[in-house]
Amino acid sequence: MTRAIIITNPAAARSDEAHLRAARERLAAGGLRVEIVRTQGPGDGQRLAREALADGAELLIAHGGDGTAMDVAAALVGTEHPLGLLPAGTGNLLAGNLRIRRSWRAATDVILAGLARPLDIGRLETRDGARYFAVACGAGFDAELMRSTASHHKRAFGMGAYVATAVGLATSITRSHLTIEADGITHEAEAAVILIANCGELIPGLLQIRPEIRPDDGVFDVAILDAASIPGAVRVVWRMLLRDPRGGAGITFLRAASVRVRAEPDLPAQADGEACGTTPLRVDLLPRALRVLAPRGA
């Protein structure tokens, strides 16, 4: 019988103990030997994951948001052990891009099906340290938004908390001069946001970077967004809502597996929605380095 460990973040915005217990029971009924361990603070997910692997666990399941998922994933990168997802956070961007629904029933169906998909993983390094990401990292207004949105607001209002914060920050968008090295080629740009994307959707089902982006194609899609004002930001977001893959109207695209970013002035950075210091950034792609349980055809 496969031994599975659910690593849960009780502080996640949509964490529900009753749903967690029900998911455990359903996984056990499906043939898994399941234990639950709980994080108590930052970094616990990775520590608990490493301890579980050392103790013989064969499957790790992250119950929480993208931060919890990537904390657990950090212990799995480069191994053959798969990651299962029980979405319980604010955005659940990785689960959404892989078409894993928020329902604990649907998520446990995916885990029990046992179809592991190899994904590329990004590694972001700033002065504050290094962090893996699966969906996107970047710097600028989006990172300031993540940093400024209070945890208790995310628990109470979900994605609406980000919208409210964005409205409050919209009049103070910082535009910087960026020096970008993409696979060794230098580019200069004025921008308010730079996104280095491994998956195609910033908000699954709604806000798309580019339709052709795949998380297993061995390359990042870099989006440079120049929006120094509210009208400029609206134009950029509108083009993404239209799912227009072309550049123009404040959007420039690059493709690379290795990206370096310097900004003047410095911009805050984020990886999968988690604040990660400021520019300069070093970002490298690790091809097919993480195996994630996902629906067929995701």
Image: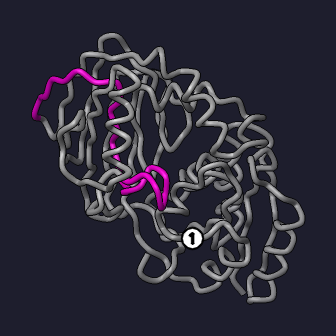
Using the rendered view, name the quadrant where residue 1 is placed. bottom right
Residue at image point 34% right, 48% down: 240
Q: Which residue is mark 1?
A: 100
Instruction: Give the left or right position of residue 119, taking residue 95 as reference.
Output: left
**Residue nearer the viewer, 6 or 160:** 160
Tell me if residue 202 comes above or below residue 194 in the rendering.
below
Principal secondary structure, stretch drawn in magenta: strand
Residue 298 image position (x, y, % from top left): 44, 75
Residue 133 image position (x, y, % from top left): 46, 47
Using the rendered view, name the quadrant where residue 43 is placed. top right
Tell me if residue 268 comes above or below residue 39 in the rendering.
above
**Magenta stretch in the rendered image:** 185-208
Give the number of callouts.
Answer: 1
Extreme-right residue of the structure: 18
Extreme-top residue of the structure: 265
Residue at image point 81% right, 52% down: 38
- What is the three-letter code of the residue carrying label 1? Ile
Instruction: Give the left or right position of residue 87, taking residue 139 as reference.
Output: right
Circle 1: element type: loop
**Residue nearer the viewer, 118 or 193:** 193
